[in-house]
Amino acid sequence: MKKLSIILCILMLFKLVRAQQEAQFSQYMFNAIYINPAYAGYHEQLNIHGFYRNQWTGIEGAPKTLSFAIDAVANKGNVGLALNALSEKLGAQRTFSAFANYAYRVRMNNDGSSRLSFGIGLGLMQSGLAAELLNPNDYETNLPVGFYSLMMPEARAGVMFANDKFYAGFSAGNLISQFLKNEKYIFIPKPKPHYYLTAGLLLPLSANVYIKPSFLIKEDRAGPTSLDLNAFFIFYDRLWIGGSYRTAIALFDKPHLQNDLSKTNAAIAALQVFPAHFRIGYAYDFSIGPLRHYSEGAHELSIGYFFNRNNLRMRTPRYF
């Protein structure tokens, strides 16, 4: 491995630039259950999807993330159910989480095309530190030895509204572990509460071409607030081409932060194709902040399968 001092700098940048500890996805709009349990059932059919993200390529010890989810509806679409799991490696850190999610979906009109959903996710999170990957030559004091691991219960909650033209959601995560005390937190970062606000529109440009602008705000009350601005062009329900810009914004004063932090983070190019029952996606992050001198960007692959694609409402914000 490269020197631990570099890895520690990465960890600091990872927090300061992303303003969070949780895993990051550039194609988050296709993995919405990860950030908000109220999205359970939003496809209104059984579907599965997986994501793999290799972030900051070219830097040894950079994050590698794998995510999987299965999603369905019950009770005539009034209930959404989902299971999701995530595994991430970041330097010597290891994280695994698994959640069962439930959403109650309230009809706001007669045909159910407008819904207000309330969701909760309950699960377990395991945080670990592989101390053997640390380099003792970089510390003047003794390093921990062995593998430190801590399993803890966790919960998330959220709300979401969607109709044929608009959607918006708010959620909060890491609601339990922040209150737990354990001596292993000396070596393992204690999870912080995270908050997500997202919204988007679906606008027709012609009979078979649509544009979908959206945004995601991520906040953990510690680092800078992170903002993703996104736009996709949708052609014939089969091809999505778009991009995003990720930066930091100042929603409120955080006096504990240094004044010269870089706000720029990444520009993102993304592509989604929908052959038959599948969705295949790819996103590439171009580093445009200080990390651009060290990183070759990030690659993110995703795939989804819909068991009854003919019933999928492609032209509504319900599909995001």
Image: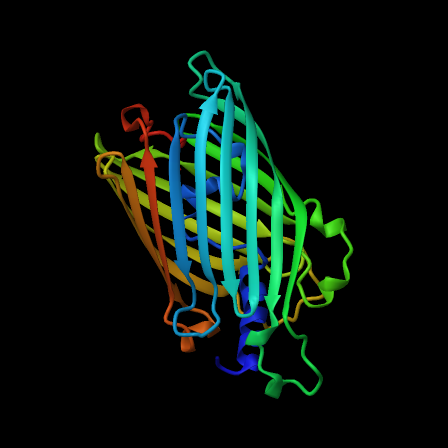
Q: Is residue 68 left or right of residue 97?
A: left
Q: Is residue 221 left or right of residue 316?
A: right
Residue at the top extreme?
A: 110
| Coloring applied to the structure | rainbow
Q: Quadrant of the C terminus?
A: top left
Identified at 50% across, 27% down, the residue is 80
Where residue 19 sits: x, y (%)? 58, 59
Q: Is residue 294 left or right of residue 150?
A: left
Question: Observer-nearest residue: 79 or 83?
Answer: 83
Q: On screen, 318 above or below 36?
A: above
Residue 261 showing in the rendered view:
no
Q: Quadrant of residue 260?
A: bottom right
Q: On screen, 157 above or below 44?
A: below
Total marks placed: 0
Identified at 44% across, 45% down, the residue is 68
Q: Is residue 63 left or right of residue 175?
A: left
Where residue 65 sits: x, y (%)? 46, 57
Residue 82 showing in the rendered view:
yes
Q: On screen, 85 above or below 120?
A: below
Where residue 277 sits: x, y (%)? 26, 34
Q: Quadrant of residue 146?
A: bottom right
Question: Observer-nearest residue: 19 or 96?
Answer: 96
Question: Observer-nearest residue: 181 or 37?
Answer: 181
Where residue 231 sits: x, y (%)? 36, 46
